[in-house]
Amino acid sequence: MAKPKPAGELDAVALETALLNTWSKENAFQNSIESRRGGAPFIFLEGPPTANGKPGIHHVVARAYKDLVCRWKTMEGFLVERKGGWDTHGLPVEIEVQKRMDLMSNEAIEEYGMENFNQACRESVWTYESAWREMTERMAYWVDLDNPYVTLHNDYVESCWWALKQMFDKGLLYRGHKVLPYCPQTGTSYSSHEVALGYKEVEEPSVYVKFKLTDDDSSILAWTTTPWTLPGNVGLAVGPEVTYVKVKVTEAAANWSGAGGAGVGETMILAKDLMKEVLRHNVEIVEEFPGSDLVGRSYEPLFPDAVPRGDSKTAWTVLSADWVTTTDGTGVVHTAVMYGEDDYNLGMEVGLPAFHTVGMDGAFVEGIHKELDGRYVKECDETIIELLSAPNGSNGKGPESGLLYREKAYLHDYPHCWRTDHPLLYYAMDSWFVRMTAVKEKLLEFNDGVEWAPDWVGEGRFGEWLRNVKDWAISRERYWGTPLPVWRSEDGQMKCIGSIEELQAEVARANAAGFDNPDCPDDVDLHRPIVDGFTLLSDDGKPMKREPFVMDCWFDSGCAPFAQWHHPFDGGETFDSSFPVDYICEGVDQTRGWFYTLLAVSTTVFDSPAYKRCLSLGLILDAEGKKMSKSRGNIVDPWDHFNREGADATRWYMVTAGAPWSPLKFDPNGVRETYAKMFLTLWNIYKFHADYAALDGFDPETNHLEVSERTPLDRWILSRLATVATNYHEGFTNWDYHKACRELEEFVVNDLSNWYVRRSRRRLWDEAENTDKLACQNTLHEVLTTVCQLIAPVSPFMVDVIYRNLAGESVHQASWPLGTPGSLEGATADSWDEDAAKATATLPPQDLALEESMALVRELAETGRRIRVDASRRQRLPCGDGWIVSGPDLAEFHGILAEELNVENISIETDLDRFQQIELAPNFRALAPRARGDVNSIAAEIRNAENPAAMLEQIKSGSLEIMGIKIEETDVEVKRVEKSGFAASTIQVGQGDDAYHVSLVLDMNDTPELLSKGLARDITRRIQAKRKDLNLDIEATIELQVWMENAPELFQADQDWIISETRASSAIFHTGDNSTSATAESFEVDGTKIYFIVS
RNA sequence: GCGCGGGUAGCUUAGUCGGUUGGAGCACCCGGCUGAUAACCGGGAGGUCGCAGGUUCGAGUCCUGCCUCGCGCACCA
């Protein structure tokens, strides 16, 4: 404990930056951890950001919630270590570098040199590191950035390799050939969570194509939205159960627009259900049959030279597939094996030829058609439509009207590259997969054990994702990333390398067999192209080359729980005691990202969940409700607020603006409001206390006064503190930080500042030592220090300054006022002895009855002011009498009320009928079940009773019936309201059955004494304002002259009072005017004119 | 299209089990109060509680449909 020093004026930004220096000098962050060294661990895992983009306000939000929980748990006595981390691999980095160096294709990169390119990536990763570090430090996110994990570090990569080998050994890692969304520009395929980032709505031409049967004049109609896949067509799929029809065109279509068409007499086959949707001609149905009847029929290829038949017996025939539906298209699915997942699977099943008509560059390969060869497929739509439309169509074997039946613009969402915005092509390619489908049940089971906030993200969104889990395509045909540690021989022998040591051994073995490998030292760089340079030896002596892929960078971050410790090569104990982690927190956009990959990796590698609690944060929107994004340019710079209102206000605003998981409309004005309301108020409360405490040499230890010896006002604010703190803690426990903080803010502003401090000001003015002043100072000390402790996890700056001055240590070393479960013997992050934890709490005693009484007192004070407004009686003119009618005993607060109401004498009136009458109100809840439809009529009769008192008597005697319903006492509420003609007001306290009514009545009659007092108060008030204008010291004395014109008598006692209140060393009170004096100031009140001179 | 979460005063938001009179804060207007801070107090104005139906004596609250915003999924042919 310390004797407080005066507070000084507030400059939040200066306060915060100065405190940052202090923290840094004191090593405050490390100390806050070290001092809990013996506590139960609470494991936090930092989701690694990429430092190749500038941090925005949305990053501040995420970091605020991470920090909040870590600081809170620390104060609860847990050991909360926080290792920083950086995500440094992957496409975002490569794209950045490619743009900067103008290397927009893989060829360009390889020409430039992979080694140089990767070096550029390695450097680019740190472009904004200092910006991140400065933001992190400035906002006081306490995380260890000096020893972070970095995904490009060899140790980290080695752990990733190890993890992959575990998967490989369990048979969960496999090489496959699958149709994947592929970006020709970046030359890479994407996993489902990356694809999800890039859906865009686009309008594209879709076409209905006639596939001419070889053994019949008819054509089968099929539909596609990707004309570029038509040259690759090798089959048509129909639903075996679906009903198809053969139709004959009976007359030419009117108002035909666009390409294509059909001649009269032409016959076409399609699903019966879709005739109306598809056909634009009048037709007659020639035949009707199930899809199974069509299976096996062969048709003419559209582009005869595009795909070689090979030895396929099923190419260009009708195939059966039960996934074919009639929701759109024609009920016939055009099948191009290499460019659709279903197509590919079907093709493999029935033996269709699997040939690419499109190259990896997104252009048609040579030999498709002379007008298409070498052209980018997305630019060929028109050409293909023209080719098909020509008489006899592109293959010269179609009907005279051509192969195109119709074209139709089609609006749909189509996946685009999340980095380059190019449309993705579904493309069959070699890829590596993690067999997530094999562990689906485990994923679901582990997810069930996670405490999600909000719960619906876990059960709903994430659960949904897991229930539809697909094998994870983890390989990328890229350069900058964790290389896939698999070596493969030409005949398919494979080895997965799980460590540098293993790599060295394999290299040595290969060299012993005569291979000429470069050196593989202990610190070999585990990146491309170094690792590509090693050729290993298969078990049967064949050379093995590394599979030329890098890993999906999400795999890297998914390895964070163990790779951050270089597990299993180092840090074994650290890992064992920190897995699974207790808490992670990121934006909801990480649901399919990090939240998933963490679980995916931990499930496949450790057969364990990765985290126990996950806070999923809502998106940050701008003030308009638009998502903040680089491309929109609406990102709020956190420094705008750090430099204006400070980090405290910014953080508090973010937490109180809404639930953590709801989208936050970031309103810069809201930050300003938070500053003005919460922090300025808090500072002024503190300043009030600290200034007087310093003046008086107050020492909370030696000047301690028991709570029981303090005034009801003191005991009230202490009880309120205990109540609010308890709710606050409960809010924290339930992830309801917003509710907790809103209530605390309400407490600080309303209870503490606007009532307790306002009511207590005069108590500290007394220069002599007295019990009342001590009571107030002790109370302020306790309330302020506790409030600081409660706020500290959310907004750590100002409260630390306050706490240091009042308590002599950092608030970040303080204990949580609701107890320190983490410090208990045998406690864990998940469980502790509740009773023992409660015993460590340091809250003052609660007195709910007192809180209730004070609430009523405050309400009566407000009621009194309302009465005065209604009666046009100014506040400074006292009333002689005030009566409180009915209600609980408030005797101990009559003094406060008299002052607040400016009433000479408050008394209790027990004769209710003197000022009040009753009114009856129907109680619908009781009445409705019996009265049913008549309830409103009955209610009206009760409400409009001419003599409610008489009606109440009738009800009590059981003799009242309305519309055949007997009215019981419980059917009505008795309200007491003031009789008209009195300056009075009635308020209802409480709700429902416990509600009661209290009235306040003020006597509006004037007496000479009251008028004199009122006059004295008005004069004093003006003089005080003048003193303030003149900037006089509080202690300074004045010389005073007053002239009163048309005034009531000012009694001697009131003159004396003016003199003492205004610290006048001399005072002369004249009667009459002084309008001629230039120096006199004047004012008028209730017809009295006053002139005065202060000198 | 499917799923989740929203839509309440000009703005930000609270609203429990359905109960008859929907609360706050900011901004605005009037008044009061102040050795009390970017303050405080009273009053005023401002609401078709997204729209339309339904259930009910009674709906911001429950049900159905629709509109709209955000997010996610899946879009395949």
Image: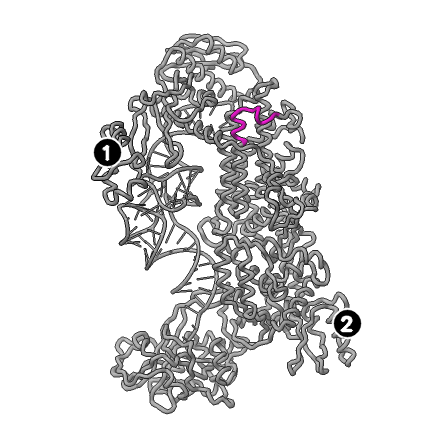
Nearer the observer, B19 or A213: B19
Tell me the residue at 38%/14% (across/down). Answer: A1088
Mark 2: few/some/many CA within 10 Å (<14, 14-19, 20+): few
Q: Which residues are magenta?
A: A705-718
> Spatial distance from mark 1 to mark 2, Cα to Cα?
106 Å
The residue furthest bottom is: A215
The residue indicated by pointer 2 is A519
- Element at badge 1? loop
Depicted A948 relative to depicted A490: above or below? above
Is residue A107 visible in the rendered image? The answer is no
Q: Look at the image and tell me in which quarter the N terminus of chain A lies.
A: top right
Q: Amino acid at mark 2?
A: Asp
Is residue A427 visible in the rendered image? The answer is yes
Q: Amino acid at mark 1?
A: Leu
The residue indicated by pointer 1 is A960
Q: Nearer the viewer, mark 1 or mark 2?
A: 1
Nearer the observer, B17 or A554: B17
